[in-house]
Image: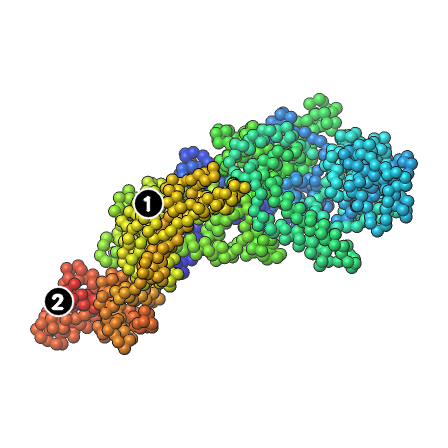
């Protein structure tokens, strides 16, 4: 075994670099793939990668989870192919290129050329395009694909627009405009007007209808000063401006149900869509109108709202075919909107409000903090806008989606289906973020660009909204089951450039449509060789119409696939199914394992499930681990600009990648909760896991070398079966505990519960380092330690042995607590301990095979078992209110009274039976707390005898001291100082030294008495006799010394010296015939030799060496013990006849 340094000098990052270099040198990864190629497949699907930027802790977490699971499956007999994630198309890449090239509008891309633009995109990622044709036509044949014009969210990124799915948005608080607008009722006798409230003034030019709630009451109100009459929902009357008094209209108040207002016509606000006058500009009713904001009347612009679109189509305001979208792809008004043509919609809000005011139709205007959808990638505002899209009819397969979800296994399970309210602490950062917005906008900044006082109700309403937003996120909307249950049809096409083109060719008249299911088909129909499937390489390809030349050609539709479609197709596309690997796919689908973050419940997990269900009627995966979000230490999102988190490379360079990975795995984030990242937490992994494990290995190596130094054969491991037959109870225990650890790891890894492994490992390491390695090293110990540090396949466990050691540790902990209470350190021996327990087997373990370990660990002279529970304690019972309160309700008082009245005999019978019936309620051991109160023996005080208990065990310690205990305590103190001095001097366990003791007290008799009475203990503890400093020879080399004062009322100095030769001058003089010169010559010669080499020569010569280096004298045999001793200790022991 190679040398090992101290833990504080060992660098885990450096060792990792060496290991990585070694793995690379031997091609470890490639070799294991080759060796396992004939083993059963374990299919792992990787999620969407990060195409831009450097990896952060979220990426490291996801990669760690995937790596741990796949490595484990490889180690347990599987062939696991790893591939990087799928999807390097889409918005993030385009955003990077737009920034690089300074592109701000869609027409700038067309001017540059799609070919040049896409090649720039290709430059920062590796394209993962594969053939979709094999499964796209399948969905088309099943009727699950359709193309319609539908209102959906679009994102404006530097005025480049694209559709975006709901699960790809985030909600931010945003200062937005709010206005109330009048819509005069046609032919109303009072010239009344409907009042609608909106936060999107830019949609008003496209208004085609007003929507009320048919179940609400609506009233007319007249302003006494202006005479204007408004119609609003009665429950929203308070929303009208309050600066001028208002009252009901003259005469009886007119109140009607919303349904009675349906089909009433009103005067349009703008005249851009007068061609719809016959069907538009009238009132409709729908339940989506709420009473929590606005006026109870919603203005509808069907091209710019999902509900607006639905309601207007349902009420024949217009048809799907004649829907006009007044905003172009760049988010600007089209020419039809003459007053605002070419203006970006958000920039036009103020001018539209002024136009409304000029028409005399403005009731109220202002701005307020409100939630608004932003693109999660580009962090820019989203708008609703109707765009023609290809949809998958998800709603038609909803029931099958729900059924397939039941066939999957998730960790944690609540994310899948069962649901729970998450820990509010996990969402505290959301609340602080929300309220922080309130402070910034209402306190730190002038409200609405004015310096007037901020109305209190504005602040309170914003706080209320923040709390509501927090509550909604604390609710169950993260559940995958809920998301599937409310699934809508999925728009899978995008009007973008960098992406996978839809393989659909259509004729100009729309009558002919061809879906390409292969490149070969496209080449055959077009006569063009295809080398690449991005837009700039196939958009020019046309196909002659099958109806004849007069019908022209078919051209590819301009759209590309939503990149989520590409990601969701990964299970089949990455192996080019169905064109290749048919058997591999069909034998191993669904895949065995996927893992991504909680946000992917609405992203990748969802698209995987939808596509696999639509195509194969199966889920895409069997097992799933869902991780949470890694936040900065302050609970906020990690931000490069705020610099609120340490660089991953900084942490890895300081503590190593493995420490970082273990820290992440042993955290709530693996259970789909949040983690506040702390660099100190990574250091704790090094301190609490890696260093104890390394030190256990170091201890193994040092003791193996020590035994070799003592003349035993070099260490070679033996099989585990031999070790399991050891007669040493701690050997049996540690072997069993190791197998329990192996069993537990297999059990939890097979259940994908990664977060349970580390706590169990920590417990094992604590037992290993604080119990097992503290026993006296032996050959068997070293063999056991080797098999612990390098465990093999799972073997037999001995649960009785493990239970026995657990009981022993309970007793040791209780006894230590007593010592601490009375300030009795472990170095001070005690005369007696009593262990009280009703279980005879428990006492047999403690007073039998484990007795010597208990006494040694606690430094106690004797142990007395006792199974009479009432001899040293009185018992009383107390109800566990936290357990019983909810269960018993009103019966709690009666039950609690009877529990407290239980006699000691009742309590003992209850503990023996495990249950008791009280007031018709069956109570278990967990329902009643049994308190054991120590009864001090007669004639003694609690300072002389004390006790501690845990459940049904009671430990009693006799704390009285006598002279013999004092001397033993001093001996322990001396040994402790010697061991600390060895470490301070930098000695290894294999380094042989001699230890000298010098008393610094005037009365040296006390220390001499201790050294004499405790000689055997000290010699066994330090491995050599403790020598008087008066015996130190003049040629001794001192390695370290230290003086100690007032140690158990003694003061002394300890010297550590190299082993020194002791010469028997009379015997040597006789050996050389009385020649004194030869005596000095031999001594000088032997002192010049290396001590360890000299020792080896004596061992090889059976205690003799031949010396022929003395000038003028023939060779002589020098005998060990007759002429010389190798150490002062050997000389002293020989003198004592030992």
Which corner quadrant holds the N terminus?
A: bottom left
* Image coordinates for residue 6, horizontal then vertical, percent: 37, 60
Residue at horizontal 52%, vertical 32%? 407
Furthest residue in direction top, as rendered? 547
Residue at 69%, 38% in the rendered image: 495
In this picture, is 1017 found above or below 189?
Answer: below
Residue count near mark 1 (Cα–Cα under 10 Å), binned few <14, some 14–19, many ≥20: some
> Looking at the picture, how far across and down is residue 910, in whole percent?
39, 42
Is residue 1131 shown to the viewer in this render?
Answer: yes
Residue at image location 21% in from the left, 68% down from the top: 1128
Count of numbered badges drawn on the protein: 2
Q: What is the spatial separation of the Cα atoms under label 1 and label 2, in whole angstroms? A: 60 Å
Between residue 2 and residue 683, name the one nearer to us: 683
Q: What residue is shown with label 1?
A: 839
- Answer with left or right where residue 336 lies relative to residue 942: right
The numbered dot on residue 1122 is 2
């Amino acid at each position: 075994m190679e040398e090992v340094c101290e833990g504080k000098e060992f660098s885990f990052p450096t060792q990792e670099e060496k290991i990585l270099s070694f793995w690379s040198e031997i091609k470890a990864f490639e070799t294991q793939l080759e060796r396992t190629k004939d083993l059963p497949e374990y299919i792992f699907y990787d999620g969407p990668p990060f195409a831009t930027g450097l990896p952060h802790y979220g990426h490291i977490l996801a990669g760690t989870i995937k790596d741990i699971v796949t490595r484990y499956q490889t180690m347990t007999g599987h062939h696991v192919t790893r591939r990087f994630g799928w999807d390097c198309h889409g918005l993030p890449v385009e955003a990077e290129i737009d920034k690089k090239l300074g592109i701000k509008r869609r027409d700038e891309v067309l001017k540059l050329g799609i070919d040049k633009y896409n090649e720039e995109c290709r430059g920062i990622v590796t394209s993962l395009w594969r053939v979709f044709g094999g499964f796209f036509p399948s969905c088309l044949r099943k009727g699950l694909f359709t193309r319609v014009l539908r209102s959906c969210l679009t994102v404006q990124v530097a005025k480049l627009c694209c559709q975006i799915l709901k699960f790809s948005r985030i909600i931010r608080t945003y200062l937005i405009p709010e206005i109330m607008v009048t819509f005069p009722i046609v032919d109303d006798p009072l010239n009344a007007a409907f009042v609608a409230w909106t936060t999107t003034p830019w949609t008003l030019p496209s208004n085609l209808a007003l929507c009320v709630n048919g179940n609400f009451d609506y009233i007319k109100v007249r302003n006494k000063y202006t005479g204007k009459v408004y119609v609003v929902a009665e429950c929203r009357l308070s929303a009208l401006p309050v600066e001028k008094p208002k009252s009901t209209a003259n005469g009886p108040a007119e109140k009607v149900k919303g349904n009675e207002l349906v089909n009433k016509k009103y005067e349009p606000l703008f005249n851009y869509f007068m061609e719809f006058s016959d069907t538009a500009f009238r009132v409709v009713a729908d339940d989506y109108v709420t009473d929590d904001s606005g006026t109870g009347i919603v203005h509808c612009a069907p091209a710019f709202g999902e509900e607006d679109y639905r309601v207007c189509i349902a009420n024949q305001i217009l048809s799907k075919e004649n829907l006009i979208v007044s905003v172009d792809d760049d988010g600007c008004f089209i020419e039809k909107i003459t007053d605002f043509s070419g203006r970006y919609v958000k920039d036009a809000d103020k001018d539209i409000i002024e136009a409304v005011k000029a028409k005399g139709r403005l009731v109220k205007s202002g701005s307020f903090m409100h939630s608004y959808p932003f693109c999660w990638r580009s962090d820019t505002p989203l708008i609703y806008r109707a765009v023609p899209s290809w949809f998958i009819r998800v709603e038609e397969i909803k029931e099958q989606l729900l059924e397939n979800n039941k066939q999957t296994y998730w960790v944690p399970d609540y994310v899948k289906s069962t649901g729970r309210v998450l820990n509010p602490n996990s969402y505290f950062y959301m609340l602080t973020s929300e309220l922080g917005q309130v402070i910034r906008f209402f306190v730190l900044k002038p409200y609405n660009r004015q310096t007037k006082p901020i109305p209190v109700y504005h602040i309170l309403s914003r706080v209320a909204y923040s709390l509501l937003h927090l509550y909604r996120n604390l609710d169950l909307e993260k559940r995958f089951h809920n998301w599937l249950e409310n699934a809508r049809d999925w728009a899978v096409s995008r009007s973008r450039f960098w992406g996978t083109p839809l393989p659909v060719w259509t004729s100009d008249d729309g009558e002919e449509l061809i879906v390409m299911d292969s490149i070969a088909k496209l080449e055959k129909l077009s006569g063009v060789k295809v080398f690449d499937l991005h837009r700039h390489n196939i958009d020019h390809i046309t196909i002659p119409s099958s109806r004849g030349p007069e019908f022209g050609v078919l051209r590819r539709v301009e759209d590309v696939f939503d990149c989520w479609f590409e990601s969701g197709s990964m299970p089949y596309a990455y192996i080019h199914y169905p064109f290749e690997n048919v058997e591999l796919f069909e034998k191993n689908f669904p895949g065995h394992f996927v893992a991504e973050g909680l946000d992917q419940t609405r992203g990748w997990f969802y698209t995987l499930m939808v596509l696999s269900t639509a195509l194969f009627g199966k889920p895409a995966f069997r097992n799933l681990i869902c991780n949470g979000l890694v936040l900065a230490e302050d609970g906020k999102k990690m931000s490069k600009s705020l610099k609120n988190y340490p660089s991953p490379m900084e942490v890895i360079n300081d503590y190593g990648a493995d420490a970082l990975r273990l820290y992440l795995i042993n955290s709530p984030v693996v259970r789909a909760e949040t983690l506040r990242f702390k660099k100190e937490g990574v250091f704790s992994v090094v301190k609490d896991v890696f260093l104890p494990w390394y030190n256990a290995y170091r201890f193994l190596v040092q003791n193996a070398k020590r035994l070799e130094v003592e003349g035993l054969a070099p260490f070679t491991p033996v099989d585990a079966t031999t070790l399991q037959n050891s007669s040493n109870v701690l050997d049996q225990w540690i072997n069993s505990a190791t197998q329990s650890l192996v069993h537990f790891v297999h059990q939890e890894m097979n259940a994908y519960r990664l977060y349970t492994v580390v706590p169990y490992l920590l417990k094992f390491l604590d037992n290993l380092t604080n119990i097992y390695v503290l026993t006296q090293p032996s050959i068997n110990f070293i063999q056991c330690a080797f098999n612990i540090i390098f465990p093999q396949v799972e073997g037999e466990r001995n649960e009785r042995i493990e239970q026995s050691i657990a009981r022993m540790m309970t007793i040791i902990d209780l006894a230590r607590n007593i010592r601490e209470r009375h300030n009795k350190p472990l170095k001070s021996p005690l005369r007696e301990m009593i262990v009280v327990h009703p279980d005879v087997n428990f006492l047999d373990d403690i007073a039998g095979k484990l007795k010597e370990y208990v006494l040694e660990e606690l430094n106690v002279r004797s142990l007395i078992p006792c199974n009479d529970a009432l001899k040293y304690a009185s018992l009383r019972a107390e109800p566990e209110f936290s357990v019983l309160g909810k269960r018993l309700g009103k019966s709690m008082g009666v039950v609690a009274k009877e529990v407290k009245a239980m006699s000691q005999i009742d309590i003992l019978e209850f503990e023996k039976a495990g249950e008791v019936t009280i007031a018709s309620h069956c109570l278990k051991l967990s329902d009643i707390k049994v308190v054991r109160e120590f009864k001090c023996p007669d004639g003694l005080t609690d300072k002389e005898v004390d006790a501690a208990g845990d459940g049904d065990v009671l430990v009693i310690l006799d704390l009285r001291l006598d002279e013999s205990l004092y001397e033993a305590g001093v001996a322990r103190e001396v040994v402790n100082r010697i061991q600390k001095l060895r470490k301070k001097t930098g000695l290894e366990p294999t380094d042989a030294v001699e230890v000298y003791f010098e008393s610094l007290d005037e009365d040296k008799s006390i220390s001499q008495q201790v050294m004499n009475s405790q000689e055997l203990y000290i010699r066994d503890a330090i491995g050599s006799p403790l020598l008087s400093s008066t015996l130190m020879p003049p040629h001794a080399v001192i390695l370290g010394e230290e003086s100690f004062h007032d140690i158990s009322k003694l003061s002394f100095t300890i010297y550590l010296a190299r082993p020194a030769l002791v010469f028997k001058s009379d015997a040597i003089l006789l050996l050389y015939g009385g020649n004194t010169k030869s005596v000095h010559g031999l001594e000088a010669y032997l002192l010049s030799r290396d001590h360890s080499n000299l020792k080896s020569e004596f061992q090889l010569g059976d205690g003799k060496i031949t010396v022929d280096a003395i000038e003028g004298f023939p060779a002589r045999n020098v005998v060990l013990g007759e002429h010389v001793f190798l150490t002062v200790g050997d000389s002293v022991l020989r003198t004592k006849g030992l």
